[in-house]
Amino acid sequence: MPAVPEPDRLLLSRREAAAACGVSEDTLRRDQRLGKLPHTRSGADGAVLYAVADLVALGRLDPRSGGMGEAAEAGGRARAERELAAARAELAVAQARIADLSAWIERTEGEVAFLRSLLAKTPVA
């Protein structure tokens, strides 16, 4: 079994937290509204992320249970897959930008060569 990450450094999505705690997502929403989960964050995609430390402090999650490690592993894998997809999209954009810039450089080099040839033909006054 993989090592369980430290609870104060781990964030779980609402779905992951509900599964790990054995409660519904509505229960976690209610806890959040009541201020019982103070370190709740929003992810880049707008998803709600709960600090495992908050879930433990509230008594919703037992850090010694195997469920936390499984949820952490699943959550980490899901986050890694989202980050990989985002990185691939960013790479595709960067590659397209590089192709555009390479074409621009080629055009510019042609213009510079043309202007140099004109300068070479122009008599000096």
Image (cartoon, rainbow, N blue to C red):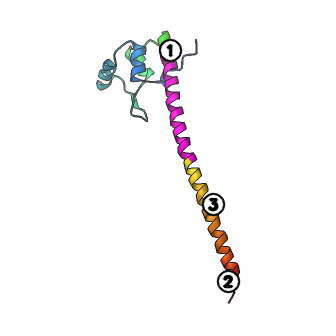
Quick check: can you spot residue 92?
A: yes
Badge number at residue 122: 2
Give the structural element (helix, strand or loop) at label 2: loop
Q: Relative to the observer, which residue lies in front, 7 or 112?
A: 112
- Count residues near mark 2 (Cα–Cα under 10 Å), then give few for <14, some for 14-19, many for 20+: few
Residue 71's spot in the image, x, y percent?
47, 17
Q: Earlier in the sequence, mark 3 or mark 1?
A: 1
Identify the residue at horizontal 54%, vertical 16% (top origin). 4
Q: Is residue 59 above or below residue 104?
A: above
Quick check: can you spot residue 64?
A: no
Question: Mark 1 belongs to which amino acid?
Answer: Glu
Please state which of the two labelled residues, at mark 1 or mark 2, is closer to the viewer: 2
User: Where does the magenta region start and end?
Assistant: 69-95
Q: Earlier in the sequence, mark 1 or mark 2?
A: 1
Residue at the extreme bottom of the image, as rendered? 125
Residue 99's spot in the image, x, y percent?
59, 51
Q: Which residue is mark 1?
A: 70
Q: Relative to the observer, which residue lies in front, 33 or 23?
A: 23
Question: Mark 2 belongs to which amino acid?
Answer: Thr
Q: CA distance from mark 3 to mark 1?
A: 53 Å
Please state which of the two labelled residues, at mark 3 or mark 1, is closer to the viewer: 3
Q: Relative to the observer, which residue lies in front, 25 or 39?
A: 25
Q: Which residue is mark 3?
A: 106
Q: CA distance from mark 3 to mark 2?
A: 25 Å
Say left or right for 112 vs 89. right
